[in-house]
Image (cartoon, helix red, strand yellow):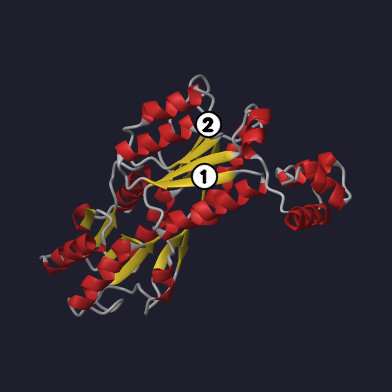
Amino acid sequence: MNVITIRDVAQAAGLSLSSVSRALNGGKNVSARVARDVVAAADRLGYQPDFLARSLRTRTSGMVGCLVSDISNPLNATIVQAAEARLREAGYMLVVVSTGNDPARERAAALEFRGRRLDGMLVSPGSDANEKTWRELVAGGTAVVILDRDPLEGDGDNRWPAVLVDHRAGAKAATRYLIGLGHRRIALLTADERMRPSRERIAGFREVFAEMGIDPAGARLCIQASPMDFAHGHTLAILRADGAPTAIVALGTRILAGVLRAARDLGLSVPRDLSVLSVGDTDLAAVHTPAITALRWSLEDIGRAAAELLLQRLRGDVGQAQHRALLPVDLVLRDSCAPPARS
């Protein structure tokens, strides 16, 4: 049985060997016509690239690892999808592991990636428990980019590559909006405050009460685990208590679902009896009736920016490389917030 080689593909496509190599490996300066002709010739001949040979020749694996806490979370899924598309365009395959915020699983996956000599990693650490692991990977030559978590301080120039979201500014915009409607009893339901996004939201939430000189007694913080049932039970408890909040700001996936379920169970109308604001513009926020006012940031931009930061390092452009990307958060006004009902 004859083995089809890249030379056969070049001959069938009527192109030079170097042009075909660039097209198959995601190189730059490949026209759409050349790429189309190469793919057609490779498919017609049944060409299968020899990744092991390429790895030995280039001393790269052509693969990038990605660690996220929960790939079923639509926020994470959209980020990963955008990063994968950009990396695939550059000739890299993305390998994704969902860690469940388990430091042991996170470390095991990172070491597995290193053992398989992956060229780089996009990581969204569940905690700071594996900081030593990330430093060891970088010291060993692996390019690492942090996804919306506390960036580690690098050696020398303190510029560890990271893509961050301006959650503090978003929380301040949401809190000012609700206070402007007349709310003073506002609950913020967010995740583990040790994580950068939650810590920044909490800081912004508190800062607005302080800046506006409003008694913070009505500002309630509710740290949530991710399951909807937990958020549902917690929301029932705070809405039944004395001095119940008139507005709730909640993460837009399972926690938001728990909040809306609790409001329904108590017979509360949104927004007449309870204003609800989503952190993250998810499908649930958009399709719910009434549509939920939401804080929105571009998940696709996070994925693309992370991929670009990583590609800069994989190309060796560290001197000119961008080290931080801070993405803005917008407040999208819909129908789920109104002035608080009179007691």
Report whether 55 appears left or right of 213: right
Give whichever of 223, 187 is nearer the camera. 223
Check disc 1: other Cα within 10 Å, few if <14, some if 14-19, many if 20+. some
Residue at image point 76% right, 46% down = 23
Report whether 202 appears left or right of 21: left
Residue 174 spot, x, y in % from top left: 38, 60
Residue 12 spot, x, y in % from top left: 85, 51
Tell me the number on the disc at residue 85: none
Residue at image point 38% right, 40% down = 125
Residue lying at the far right in this picture: please name it: 14
Give whichever of 304, 239 is nearer the camera. 304
Point out the frontmost of discs 1 and 2.
Answer: 2
What residue is disc 2 on? 117
**Residue 241 picture quarter:** bottom left
Residue at image point 26% right, 66% down = 258
Residue at image point 51% right, 19% down = 156
Report whether 58 appears left or right of 305: right
Judged from the image, the secondary structure of the residue bearing numbered disc 1 is: strand
Tell me which label, 1 or 2, sits earlier in the chain. Answer: 2
Give whichever of 340, 163 is nearer the camera. 163
Residue lying at the far top in this picture: please name it: 156
**Residue 262 picture quarter:** bottom left
Residue 223 spot, x, y in % from top left: 23, 52
Task: State how far apart marks 1 and 2 are (Cα).
Answer: 30 Å
Q: Amino acid at mark 1?
A: Leu
